[in-house]
Image (spheres, grey):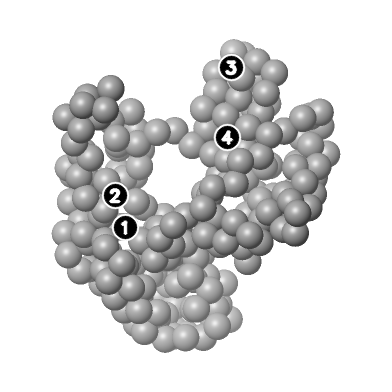
Amino acid sequence: MGQKVHPTGFRLGVIKDWEARWFARGKRIAEYLHEDLKIRDYLEKRLKHAGLSRVTIERTADRLTVNIYTSRPGVVIGSKGREADNIRRELEYLTGRKSIYLNINEVRIPEIDAPLIAKNIAYRLEQRVSHRRAMKRAVELAMKMGAKGIRVQVKGRLGGAEIARKEWYRVGRVPLQTLRADIDYAEATAFTKAGTVGVKVWVYKGDVLQREEEEVE
């Protein structure tokens, strides 16, 4: 039995917020959950080469809002907003809803965004780049762009080896048990010729202090 806790789930309600914000009763819970999964899966495939970081979904009584976080907002919006309109229409067709609101947000520093780092390493492994080289490059870039600490792990048939193994690098601090520590965590899968290789990334971006939030209020 493992003793590990998901870094985001551990901090929910303390310094992290939910990626789906809505309330439902009875059968509606399953309906909304499956709709959320459909939307996320579709956007993951549709925006595979647009630097998609994450998708958050908000629901009110008569409104569904999809927030897309991407490092390349120009690709998602398209010329005169045509691409964004196409995505919105496709989501409406997929879910059977009359109106979906789309918000496209830019990820300003993709080098310290865990989902983008994990996807980039997975992509490089699929291109047959050495796993050590891909990991070292990701770690160096993250530290250069202002991360307080980063840990990167790959697990599987590395380099096409017969026996699967795990390798990881860590630079700086990654305090997983500190609730106020802002840990950005993500997973990705590289589909190589030898089999699948799992990629995990933890990025420590500093502490979120309660005192600062109270002062803002």
- Give the labeled residue for mark 1: 202
Residue at (55% x, 23% y) in the render: 22
Left of 181 or right of it: where is 85?
Answer: right
* CA separation in Å, label 3 and label 2: 29 Å
Residue at (54% x, 47% y) in the render: 105
* Quadrant of the image containing the C terminus: top left
**Which image quadrant for residue 97?**
top right
- The dot on residue 28 is none
Q: Amino acid type of disc 2?
A: Ile
- Give the labeled residue for mark 3: 24
- Give the labeled residue for mark 2: 183
* CA separation in Å, label 4 and label 1: 23 Å
Left of 159 or right of it: where is 181?
Answer: left
Residue at (77% x, 30% y) in the render: 99
Percent across and percent down for residue 158 are: 42, 80
Q: Earlier in the sequence, mark 4 or mark 3?
A: 3
The residue nearer to you, when weighing 80 against 21, is 80
In the displayed structure, would residue 94 be above or below residue 161? Answer: above
In the displayed structure, would residue 51 be above or below residue 103? Answer: below
* CA separation in Å, label 3 and label 1: 32 Å
Q: Amino acid type of disc 1?
A: Trp
Q: Earlier in the sequence, mark 3 or mark 2?
A: 3
Left of 212 or right of it: where is 107?
Answer: right
Q: Nearer the viewer, mark 4 or mark 3?
A: 4
Residue at (79% x, 37% y) in the render: 92
SS class, disc 2: strand
Percent across and percent down for residue 127 are: 55, 83
Q: Earlier in the sequence, mark 4 or mark 2?
A: 4
Q: Nearer the viewer, mark 3 or mark 2?
A: 2
- Give the labeled residue for mark 4: 57
Q: Determine contact: label 1, label 2, CB under 8 Å.
A: yes
Disc 1 crowd, CA 10 A, few/some/many (<14, 14-19, 20+): many
